[in-house]
Image (cartoon, grey):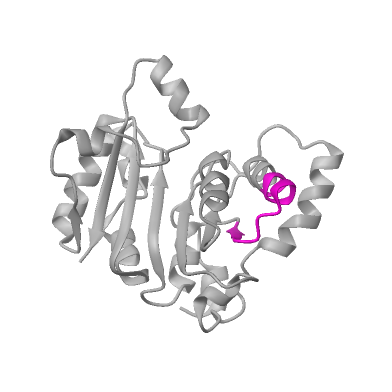
Amino acid sequence: MTDMERRGRATEAFFGRRKGKALREQQADRLATLLPAFIIDLSAAPPEPPKSIFPDPVEKMRLEIGFGGGEHLIHRALETPSTGFIGVEPFVNSMQKLLARVDETGARNVRVYNDDATQLLDWLPDHCLDQIDLLYPDPWPKRKHWKRRFVSKTNLDRFHRVLKPGGLFCFASDIDTYVNWTLLKCRDHGGFEWTAQNAADWLTPYEGWPSTRYEAKARREGRSSAYLTFKRV
């Protein structure tokens, strides 16, 4: 897909709002300054090697789609500075929050994209990612909206192309129907192997899991979470 085709197509996988409460002037100014420094420019060809999108050498690349408040992404970036993290989030308020934390902590292993994640996935070269995280995505609970769920045959094809052999797709949700949906979609795709050996494997948070405000809210409301890990085969 050419850049012109990418920019001209309708949004494929983003259906939510892009703005919430208006940013304060200082926040808006900070975002305007920081975003150009960290955003991935899809109008340019992917660099070779792909890891060179980061200013310092990194050993691995990891993508988080829909990072929300950014708690997980910034935690992982600081925890593993040898990994380069790409975060996708169209919601302006969330992007401002993450970049403010990146600026405050001095993290240099973070890059972002602020539009439809499928555009970035189509831009990335083959077999460049070690891991993709899709954590608490919008469940679209109404059956008529299930087609909007990010986990689909088309997007799993995208994941399979950009993940290295043996790379991981990690999915977390507190919505049972979406957990079951994801298990079935990955099984039917054939390119992903569910790594769980027993129930504890998928009911236990990932190692080093920082938790998030969304997860805390779900637990207060009586919903438990599932943490699924699939290996790209």
Would residue 181 be found to the left or right of residue 188 on screen? right
In the rendered image, which quarter contains the N terminus? bottom left
Quadrant of the rendered image containing residue 47: bottom right
x 68%, y 50%: residue: 102
Residue 105 rendering spot, x and y as whole percentages: 70, 48
| Whether residue 168 is situated above or below residue 174 in the rendered picture | below
Residue 60 rendering spot, x and y as whole percentages: 45, 67
Closer to the camera, 37 or 89? 37
Residue 137 rendering spot, x and y as whole percentages: 41, 41
Quadrant of the rendered image containing residue 188: bottom left
Would residue 92 be found to the left or right of residue 130 on screen? right
| Whether residue 101 is situated above or below residue 49 in the rendered picture | above
Magenta-drawn stretch contains 87: no
Magenta-drawn stretch contains 102: yes
Numbered label tally: 0
What span is in magenta?
99-113
Closer to the camera, 175 or 101? 101
Residue 78 in sight here: yes
Residue 107 rendering spot, x and y as whole percentages: 65, 55
Closer to the camera, 217 or 141? 217
Residue 42 in sight here: no
x 53%, y 59%: residue: 86
x 41%, y 22%: residue: 218
In the rendered image, which quarter contains the C terminus? bottom left
